[in-house]
Amino acid sequence: MATAPRVQTYGMQQRSDRMDFYIRDKAARPALTSPHRHEYFQIQVNLGGDTVQHIGGAVRPFPRNTLAFILPHRLHVIPHPEDGNFVLINFSQAFLLPNLHCDPMDLEDVALSDAPELAPFRFQEHVDFTLDDASFAEVAALLSQMRVADRTRQLGSASMLRGYLLQLIGKVCNLFEPQLRALAASKAERQGRRDAMGRVMGYIREHIADPGMTLTDAAAAAFLSPNYLTHLLRKETGSSFSELVLERRMRLARTHLVNGSKPLSHVAEICGFADEAYFSRRFRKAHGMPPGQFRREQREAL
């Protein structure tokens, strides 16, 4: 089985000139052209050149005058056309929300009333933040102010930059308030997690017979980072990936042992165990008896 291509996760130090806040256009650094994640927040602003954005498990239009709000650890890519133009802003969680002490992987669980600034980031997979010309002109003015303040950093510049950033986010929240509040009320981010879990479970079912199935490949299939998938599984199931896969394999093995007559070596193979001996050891540990004895006792009980 071919493994999924490795998806890079970037830190601020790899894609930014400073560790708190960084703004640039396409001339300053080439855009990333393959799906990736980063540990920081990002806003992309399309100044020209219609395209799309791939965000999490969604594909959304990304025309001119549109903003993209990307949470930490969210798989994404925007294939900018060569003749297009954009501005990109990277910033840390501490810069945006210095008083919010929350694991970046739990940001979707923060109440909207506690951090309204997170709303566009949380619901980017559901909303296209495309502005009319007048509103976009206000955003463009804020971007210009940010670039001046960032280029001429001095005492107070960080506070000014945070203020401009909050104005930009606040402007978008004002313009899209009905959609954002409706999505928050419907707990849309939980549906996103359920969809991701569904993709993970589907991947496990499809590849259950493969002894080489890995967390990394399952995460890629669900558009998640391995770290986020581990976090999500612990939160949603209380199990690690390996525990979840073993439980599914044991469940499938019990079904074949009770309802079929194929040899144990075949049961081991179709349940994803490298050999019969390893299958027998894991089955005995899980059920207190070897698989052959389990089959006999179950049949005698019928």
Image (cartoon, rainbow, N blue to C red):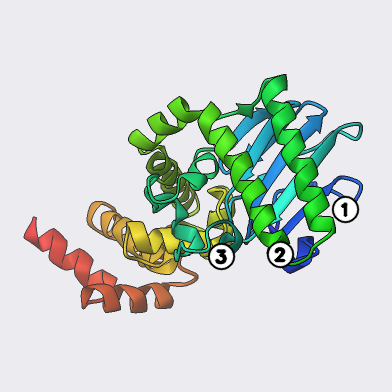
**Residue 12 numbered tag:** 2
Exactly how many numbered labels are in the figure? 3
Mark 2 is surrounded, within 10 Å at the Cα level, by few (under 14), some (14 to 19) or many (20 or more) other residues, namely some
Image position of 268 (left or right of 289) = right
Q: Comparing marks 3 and 2, which lies closer to the viewer?
A: 2
Q: Quadrant of residue 124?
A: top right
Residue ID for mark 3 = 212
State which tag comes first along the sequence, 3 or 1: 1
Q: Is residue 77 visible?
A: no
Given residues 201 and 212, the one toward you in this image is: 201
> Is residue 146 or residue 109 the one in the foreground?
146
Residue 197 percent location from the top left of the image: 42, 48
Q: Which numbered dot is residue 197?
A: none
Q: Residue at x 79, y 56 (%)?
A: 150
Q: On the rendered image, what quadrant is the C terminus found in?
A: bottom left
Which of the 4 quarters of the picture holds residue 282? bottom left
Of labels 3 and 1, the one closer to you: 1
Name the spot of residue 30 as percent of width and height, x first: 87, 50
> What amino acid type should be assigned to the residue bearing mark 1?
Arg
Q: Residue at x 46, y 62 (%)?
A: 100
- Structural distance between the alpha carbons of marks 3 and 1: 38 Å
Disc 1 crowd rating (10 Å Cα; few below 14, some 14-19, many 20+) is: few
Kind of residue at badge 3: Gly
- Give the alpha-carbon distance from disc 2 to disc 1, as whole Å: 14 Å
Helix, strand or loop status at disc 1 = loop
Q: Which mark is residue 29?
A: 1
Calculate the distance from the C-alpha at mark 3 to the C-alpha at mark 2. 33 Å
Q: Label 1 near label 3: C-beta < 8 Å?
A: no
Q: Is residue 140 above or below residue 225?
A: above
